[in-house]
Image: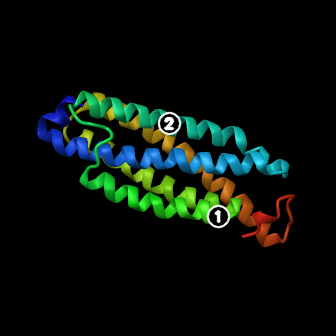
Amino acid sequence: MEKLAQKNAARLIDLLSERLAFERAGVKLYDALLGRLRAATDPELRALLEPTQLHRDEESEHQEWLEEQIRALGGDPHAPSEHSVLVQKEAEGIELVLLRDPSIAHDFHALLLAELADHAGWDLLVQLAVAFGDEPAQREFEKRLRQEEEHLRFVREALLGMTFMALRGQATGDAHLVI
């Protein structure tokens, strides 16, 4: 992250803080979804527990890694920044869906929105690292971008499956699954 920090360390901290705010929100979203999946009686929904837990744990690792990077750059990972405050507000809107709506399918839809934004944020960091020739940062960002791509694929497939079931009129053991 050395080359990126040489250009504008304060702006880099702001960008990393933005990602950090979204990773923290992602952990919350996954935690809420995991609670609902654990309570589900439908075996197809319960089968989503293990991959959902894996993705949640990766979001948590992203959060911890970002906190370390911000500290290494002399920043405070708990201090609000211009962009982290905006991202936090965006994430709160997505969180409201999970808190107010009992539909697991709606949870996955909200998570899809979060994962799309998360993917875009890591992609931006990769592009910046490439543009400034910071290969070590690029490798680290690409590692997390690949994980986000897997999260996105999983959430899309789960939501697609639930949507197909709803369109076919198939009932599940969990009435709140209806979309």
Element on which disc 2 rests: helix
Residue type at the position of mark 1: His
**Alpha-carbon span between mark 2 and mark 1:** 22 Å
Asked if 58 appears above or below 25 in the picture, the reply is above
Residue type at the position of mark 2: Ser
Q: Foreground residue, 30 or 126? A: 30
Q: Foreground residue, 15 or 152? A: 15
Asked if 122 appears above or below 170 in the picture, the reply is above
To which residue does mark 2 refer?
60
Viewed as shown, does residue 160 lie left or right of 21? right
- Rate crowding at label 1 as few (under 14), some (14 to 19) or many (20 or more) other CA atoms within 10 Å: some
**Residue 108: percent from left, percent from top:** 63, 57
Element on which disc 1 rests: helix
Query: Which residue is painted at 53% across and 59% down in the image?
Result: 95
**Residue 3: percent from left, percent from top:** 17, 32
> On the rendered image, what quadrant is the N terminus found in?
top left
To which residue does mark 1 refer?
106
**Residue 7: percent from left, percent from top:** 12, 39
Query: Which residue is painted at 71% across and 51% down in the image?
Result: 36
**Residue 148: percent from left, percent from top:** 49, 44
Query: Which residue is painted at 56% across and 45% down in the image?
Result: 151
Viewed as shown, does residue 3 lie left or right of 96? left
> On the rendered image, what quadrant is the C terminus found in?
bottom right
- Rate crowding at label 2 as few (under 14), some (14 to 19) or many (20 or more) other CA atoms within 10 Å: many
Q: Residue furthest left?
A: 7
Name the colouring of the figure. rainbow
Q: Is residue 109 visible?
A: no
Among the two numbered marks 2 and 1 on one chain, the one whose residue lies closer to the N terminus: 2
Q: Which of the 4 quarters of the picture holds residue 131? A: top left
